[in-house]
Amino acid sequence: MKINENYKNLSESYLFSTIAKKVAVYTQQHPEQEIIRLGIGDVTLPLAAPVVDALHAAVEEMGKKETFHGYGPEQGYGFLKQALMRYYARRGVVLAENEIFVGDGAKSDIGNILDLFDVDNTVLVPDPVYPVYVDTNVMAGRRIVYAAATRENGFLPMPQADVQADLIYLCSPNNPTGAAYSRDQLQAWVDYANERGAVLLFDAAYESFITDGDVPHSIYEVNGAETCAIEFCSFSKTAGFTGTRCSYTVVPQALVRGSLHLNAMWLRRQTTKYNGVPYIVQRAAAAVFTEEGQKATRAAIDYYRANAAVIAAALDEAGIWYCGGKNSPYIWMQCPGGMKSWDFFDHLLEHAGVVGTPGAGFGAQGEGYFRLTGFGDAEKTRLAAQKLKEAVRVL
Amino acid sequence: MKINENYKNLSESYLFSTIAKKVAVYTQQHPEQEIIRLGIGDVTLPLAAPVVDALHAAVEEMGKKETFHGYGPEQGYGFLKQALMRYYARRGVVLAENEIFVGDGAKSDIGNILDLFDVDNTVLVPDPVYPVYVDTNVMAGRRIVYAAATRENGFLPMPQADVQADLIYLCSPNNPTGAAYSRDQLQAWVDYANERGAVLLFDAAYESFITDGDVPHSIYEVNGAETCAIEFCSFSKTAGFTGTRCSYTVVPQALVRGSLHLNAMWLRRQTTKYNGVPYIVQRAAAAVFTEEGQKATRAAIDYYRANAAVIAAALDEAGIWYCGGKNSPYIWMQCPGGMKSWDFFDHLLEHAGVVGTPGAGFGAQGEGYFRLTGFGDAEKTRLAAQKLKEAVRVL
Ligand SMILES: Cc1ncc(COP(=O)(O)O)c(C=O)c1O
Ligand SMILES: Cc1ncc(COP(=O)(O)O)c(C=O)c1O
């Protein structure tokens, strides 16, 4: 019996557990001090009323023999895929129904897609990065090379002629940096991938936060992406589904490597190792695309984005460099006075009772940076932004 | 870019599509003939009232800011794991909370668990078998050896001293054969695995159909299983969750191979590639374990089992050999007169309008056998059993 020894190469992340410990110690020493969490990567507003209504209606169906639903198609019901096709079509992206796969989360699909690729591939991952891209490949034993995201490139690394990569992760708008690629920048990545036969894994989990007309919501808005890109998207941040679980992955028919169609491979993977998203959850997801559903979910996104704008305004006033916030719930700030990420974490907790996320936790290039998010309560975010400004001033 | 070429070695299963085509042709030729489906592997009764109530209540929570649930623990909420611990404890199996992992389906977990094992392992799979065990290993490129389940061994293959296997699949009560291992038989498998350092993957998806006191519901009722076995179970058949999606997998703390703890590896796998089961679904699953929940879900299982008994009685009267039915919704019958599986399929459709599943579709040893299930409607099952008897008589 041989175990998968690659698991030994995983480095434990102590990021969020260390944060929790530090906050616990501080709270014990300062029981009177209110803690405001601006580090959170989870939504806080409830499900929208049209989504709640759709859930109740679907639950009723499940309780009656005539309208009960057992196993559904592993890749999702037609009613939801049709709604997604119309959503893509708004931006001129025409997808076939069998190019869309409904799943239980972008995290699952981003991890599981790797089943389709040989271990003997080189993976290009931005740094800093959503840790899942790295860990899933370490588990499989693939070579990883990093694309440095820095203040100089606006935290948007571009293709390098001398780097050979077979699988390329792009996340735009980005977690943790909030930076978002323009159409021209994505075109450069698509051209690069097509020239070299690489596959882009495009994480669009935050597309609904985009305001800038020049930032594509989907990689398929870019010419030639259908022969090189797989797209992952999620209802988690778009509609507050982090605890309700629904996502969608697009694998174009035109994406072929060797003699294999990746669409057919992913269909085979999902029909073999997956049994679909709950019927009631797919009904809830479809309700997001009704007129009322769009209105209600857009209002929540506006709320989070307004929070990000409040934080951004405080940083502007304090003269601190940051990116993100505009097309993203995330703000990525440079720690003032050349401080290191964890030193600034301690300082902010000590002087403002505000908790953020040290950039160093997302990769080596994150050192000296700090992530703040707009997912909190509006009133508390205003208070925290004020305190943040003051805490920076005393430095 | 190297694709996973193992996908080329997958054989397409045309089992259910061939059945559908044959039925369509027959229906066109005999529009007046009612078709009764006894081949179905999916539940047909609605969710139980206590489950429906729990879903509605949880949906209400999700619609209010104060009670909203975002990301939960990837491995499941404590309230559900506690309920599962009590369920296991009824049979004397004491589990720690961190040995239980809540998932979205036994199919997912059975597929994904393979991430923990090297490709260079030999896998022992019974034949006939639930096709997922085979296909998931073909995809990864592992060697597969088969344990023949035959009429001679009651479709319950036992360990063979001369067969070297690292991963061993057991499914009891079995799909497709309905056969269930006794305590002594499972003890032999556990001893064999412990002696050789193999890992048993024990699929208990049908445990709730067990009536026989000598048939363990859990592999952990058997001495020594905690050092060699992983158990998969599901609410799909137990509580009609095929379209609602919830399962649980047990990985004991004592299960260690090399220097690696499989429990820690699976935790790492799930926290990296999975984001948990919907909160509302976990509340629904917990409701199965309330007094009313148990009463209602047991009633559904009794209904299906009564259907299986009706089919079994017809076969007894016709003098046809079969196994299953007693501890299982499945009945595995020998095709009369030495007929082959597909020939009997055609005969039964032609002479009775009854649709079953040809045993040959589950593996080479399934040739000459036929699967019938108790998941249909009671009235129709009675009618089908009558017609089955008549169709066999004309042979
Ligand atoms: C960049 C990125 N991709 C994917 C995910 C996972 O989303 P889901 O909730 O759909 O699993 C997240 C969640 O935080 C994320 O930040
Ligand atoms: C033997 C066996 N294991 C597992 C499963 C999968 O169950 P789930 O619905 O939990 O994915 C099935 C479903 O038919 C099955 O027959």
Image (spheres, coloured by chain):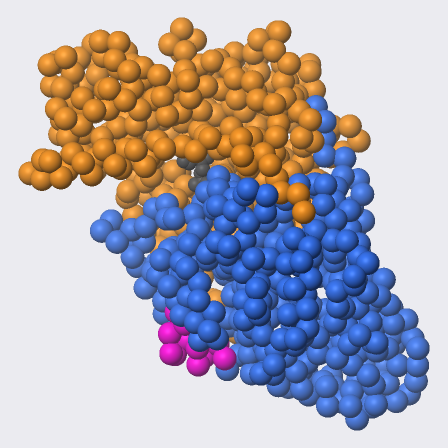
Chain colours: A orange, B blue
Q: x%, y% of residue B188?
A: 68, 69
Q: Is residue A168 above or below residue B63?
A: above
Q: Quadrant of the C terminus of chain B?
A: bottom right
Given residues B141 and A264, the one toward you in this image is B141
Determine whether, in the image, residue B41 is placed left or right of residue A154.
right
Q: Residue B64: x and y, percent?
A: 26, 52
Closer to the camera, A322 or B105? B105
Segment colored magenta:
B287-298
* Position of residue B143 measured from the top left corner of the image (x, y, whole percent): 78, 47
In the rendered view, does A300 fall on the left or right side of A194? left
For the point 11% across and 36% down, the residue is A29
Quarter holding ligand 1: top left
Residue B222 location, quadrant: bottom right
Decide if residue A123 is in sight here.
yes
Q: Residue at x 44, y 24 (%)?
A: A129
Left or right: where does residue B277 sit relative to residue A164? Answer: left
Q: Is residue B239 above or below residue B65?
A: below
